[in-house]
Amino acid sequence: TRIGRTGSMGDYVSSIAAYGDFVFITGNFGFRLIDYSNPSLPSIVWSNYDFGWYASLYINSHNMYIVENSELVILDISSPASPFEESHLTLGPNVHAFEVETQGRYAYIASWEGLFVVDIYDLSAPEIVVNIIGVFAGITVSSDRAYLLPAHSQGRTIVYDIQNPLQPVEMSRLWTFEGVSQLEIVGDYGYLVSNSPAGLCSFDQVSEEIINCYPEYPVGSRLLFSDSKLFITSGDLS
């Protein structure tokens, strides 16, 4: 059930991340902070152009991890209205990073140049510890698995076992879905946006059996689960 919306965010939304009563969002409009303490009437707190078109955001505790092009930037967002940089890391001279997630002391980054695993135990000095060659456009980390999303419309999602983060091992592929552009795992269920079947689909992550699909949300829509709410972006924030 839709409970509120901000109105148009622009033609392209690249990432969305929630922190308390706030949502951070990036796209061709730049980098914005949204206050949704009143869910029926969310409001824009600030906008800037520090990050934008291809930035990906991920929040763990009071830290935000951002990848854009070849850079990983770590921000302290204890005060959402005044975030500040803790550190940054260059992944390589020609890296095209698209998404980051963290678990424990490691950050996992999907790029056209493969999977990067970064040790973030010391937030002031992050360090690359693994790079697995591949062509990926997104990542979802859930428990001891990392789901690497394909970079083309007919590709399959690759599932890696990351029980040992220093030695990821390919486990399987999600053969039911082609061209997955977004994936969230919540308990026993997955929620994704794919090219085929087209739209937003929910599924049993063990059997891959499709539960429901909503074709009105196209490839490129962004998903975020927070406090039992599903945030979906497709140009507008819904």
Image (cartoon, rainbow, N blue to C red):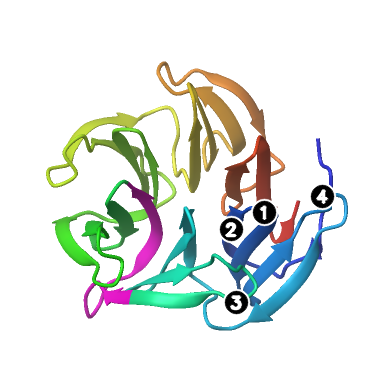
Query: Can the viewer see residue 119 in this picture?
Result: yes
Is the residue 111 above or below the residue 53 in the image? above
Please rate how many residues cluster around mark 1, counting C-alpha atoms within 10 Å: few if below 14, some from 14 to 19, many from 20.
Answer: many
Q: CA distance from mark 4 to mark 1?
A: 15 Å
The dot on residue 69 is: none
Note whether residue 151 is visible.
no
**Residue 39: which disc?**
4
In magenta stretch: residue 99:
yes
Q: Residues within 10 Å of mark 2 (few under 14, many from 20)?
A: many
Describe the element under mark 3 as helix, strand or loop: loop
Give the amino acid type for the residue marked by disc 4 in the picture. Answer: Pro
Q: Earlier in the sequence, mark 4 or mark 1?
A: 4
Judging from the image, what secondary structure is the residue with disc 4 in? loop
The span picked out in magenta is 88-103
Which is nearer the eye, 61 or 146?
61
Name which residue lies at 28% across and 56% down: 135
* Disc 1 + disc 2, Cβ < 8 Å: yes
Which mark, residue 233?
A: 1
Q: Amino acid at mark 3?
A: Ser
Precedes in sequence: disc 1 or disc 2: 2
Residue under numbered circle 2 = 16
Q: Residue furthest right?
A: 41
Residue at 60 percent of width and 54 percent of height: 18
Q: CA distance from mark 2 to mark 4?
A: 16 Å
Q: Is residue 25 left or right of residue 238?
A: left
Q: Position of residue 3 (x, y in %)?
A: 84, 43
